[in-house]
Amino acid sequence: MKNWVKVTGAGVLSATLLLGGCGAPSEEKAEANVKTEKTTLKPGSQIKLEGAVNVRDLGGYKTTDGLTIKPHKLIRSAELANLSDSDKKKLVNTYDLSQIVDFRTNSEVTAKPDPKLTDVTYTHDSVMKDNGASTSAQDLTASLAKMDNPETFLINANKSFITDETSIQAYKEFFDILLANQDGSVLWHCTAGKDRAGFGTALVLSALGVDKNTVIDDYMLSNKYRAADNKKAIEAVAAKTDNKKVIAGMTAVMEVRESYINAAFDEIDAKYGSMDNFLKEKLGLTDDKKEQLKKAYLY
């Protein structure tokens, strides 16, 4: 099965984004087209690909100071190993992809490496320690049967994004990549595109000035865009066992829930007082760097 989530050990989740007319447009016309795209772009819209799910363009989200995230600049995704040739062309040509940041562990990368894309820089930036554990259906079912509360596990996993040094360093490097990006779009992903990539997205949106409710709404969209894959994974477990605890556990592991992301936010508030403080103190996002980030990705 694909898209399994490892639920044992200390690891977090190894889960299992025209100009018309003749001649060169004037600056005024170009600006008018930008404004038109700005008002019509649907925030967090799905990029439909043949070989990947939960791929979303963050363009269109509004900030609290009235600016908008530029389209075709910030993309979140699930694993990319099965991209078709058409998918690759779409990401490179339509979305001007220039950087891929892979949040998966070494084991995940080895099992399903990202495809090489022309003129696209790839960075492996693991958010969690690699325990090298099996993600087979049999092992997963056994793990879920032993867990008292899989939802609590996911809550603690999200807290670990704030406390684990591996996670902190990975997200710090992620922001360094975003800041260094000069042209094109940056895509970041994990396996399911919902936990490690989901929290990374929450950090980016927060740093750009998007309000917390919108950040949570974007996080929860993984349930919508992963619905078919989640259903298959849950049904596959249900076909092997009638243990309701295991089936409920698999559901909790495959979904995103507000309690998960709020656990991370609460941990930030408890330890650092605010998201801004966390970004500055742990991820090195100074006021100057934050302004640089906004200049690059907002209009």
Image: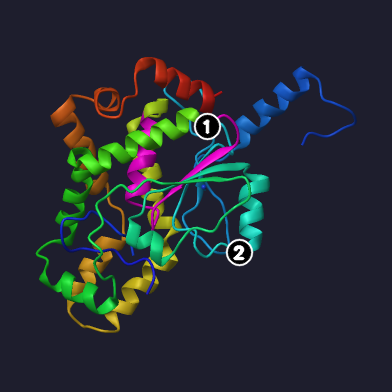
Q: Is residue 269 left or right of residue 137?
A: left
Instruction: Look at mark 1 in the image and give the residue it sits on.
Output: 181
Q: Position of residue 159 (x, y in %)?
A: 19, 43
Relative to 24, 144 lies left or right: left
On the image, numbered disc 2 is attached to which residue?
84
Residue at image point 65% right, 26% down: 35
Indicate the quadrant where residue 289 lies: top left
Q: Does residue 190 show up magenta in the picture?
A: yes
Look at the numbered disc 1 and give the secondary structure of its residue. Answer: loop
Residue 56 as seen in the image, left or right of residue 131: right
Residue found at the far top of this picture: 288
Along the polypeptide, which appears first: circle 2 or circle 1?
Answer: 2
Residue at 23% from the left image edge and 36% from the top image edge? 265
Q: CA distance from mark 2 to mark 1?
A: 26 Å
Q: At numbered mark 2, what does the secondary structure look like: helix, strand or loop?
A: loop
Q: Which residues are magenta?
A: 181-206
Vertical placement of 199 versus 5: above or below? above
